[in-house]
Amino acid sequence: MKKTGIIITMLALLISTMPLMAQDDAGEKFNFEIVKKLKSAPVRDQYRSGTCWSFSANSFIEAELLRMGKPEVDLSEMWVVRNAYQEKAEKYIRVHGSLNFAGGGAFHDVFNVWSKYGAVPEEAYKGLNYGEDKHVHGELDAVLKKFVEGVLENDNKKLSTAWKQAFSGILDAYLGVRPEKFKYNGKEYTPKEFAQSLGFNPDDYVNLTSYSHHPFYSQFVLEIPDNWAWGLCYNVPLDELMQVFDNAIDNGYPVCWGADVSEKGFSWTKGVAVVPAESRPDLDGLERDKWEKLTEKEKNEKLFSLDRPIPEKEITQEIRQEAFDNYQTTDDHGMVITGIAKDQKGTKYYLVQNSWNTNNIYEGYFYASETYVKYKTMNIVVHKDAIPKDLKKKLNIK
């Protein structure tokens, strides 16, 4: 009886402490506090298309228009994709196929299309002419690639005068004929007139990156496959690039962010992106002994559970460069940074607007740690006035 009584008492004590233990455990889970959040248009959905570059840059422009006090507008991403694909095909043929030809692109493609072709609202050009309700580009991308390859490989030993029109016809069939005029809010516009009416000037925006294989404070063509237009980036040291992020958000400017999200430290479902440290310097004594006894698989499972704050790797210019040189950082995804946050431990994060619909825990957004942004940023686009004055001077940006 005494033994039974002791067991019952121990069980009661255990049960009574379980809620507290659960609370302590829950308290360690990510708890974000938004420090600053900028205005932004609704989250869009690129669905099954490799057009994040168009969705993100258009969302960035929409956020910029809101910053300038303009009404909210839903811009057509497929208008940009349609025109950029035509330009890309002509360049692909011009360089005899020595160019990446796929659905991907870069932020400057959107700005180039804006300058050359203008812009249209989503309602005037949805780009869904192929029996789908959402963007599904597998067939389109494959057909266009085979077409330009066929043009190059033809046995005539010269190009016909018809191939450009034929290529355009494929785009028309899938995405729709480009409107010469359309009505928006009761007024008729051409695409160039509509772009002009919005008051957005592509020439006010600057592309920045940070890699040491080119001189700092100069421009170079970022060597990534989707940079088919050979767009230039200003190259700055990592610490100054990070200053641009903070100066932009602090002063109300969104950041168009190109980064690698193929890392194990990124989870769309959980809404976080971090770079876990390879060891656990935060542990000591018995906890450290337990950690060291874990297998490599068990350590990885804990490091990449991504359900609570953990120590992160220290990122330097050298580590960042090595990852780029070794293909550990690749041109992967375009997004928009619209705010700054911190977790319960005070660690800094950036609030990121994605284009994968609103079906994750943060309804289309996620939190990328400052460490992750340092490590995995490929390039950014910001308004020139979002750049700190001393850096603008070094880059000779007026």
Image: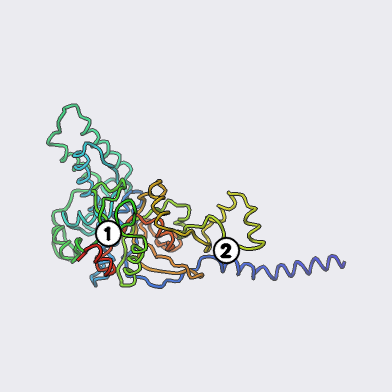
Number of numbered discs present?
A: 2
Residue at the (31%, 72%) spot, across then down: 251
Residue in the foreground of this view, choosing between 33 and 298: 298
Q: CA distance from mark 1 to mark 2?
A: 38 Å
Quarter of the image for residue 76 reads: bottom left
Circle 2 residue: 282
Residue at the (41%, 50%) spot, across then down: 323
Whichever of labels 1 and 2 marks the residue nearer the N terminus, that label is 1
Circle 1 residue: 217
Which class describes the residues within 10 Å of circle 1: few (<14), some (14-19), or many (20+)? some
Residue 242, position as x, y percentages in the image: 36, 64
Q: Secondary structure at mark 1?
A: loop
Amino acid at circle 1: Tyr
Q: Secondary structure at mark 2?
A: loop
Residue in the foreground of this view, choosing between 162 and 106: 106
Residue 12, position as x, y percentages in the image: 74, 69
Residue 126 visible? The answer is no
Closer to viewer: mark 1 or mark 2 = 1
In the visual, does 284 lie left or right of 217? right
Residue in the foreground of this view, choosing between 322 and 202: 322
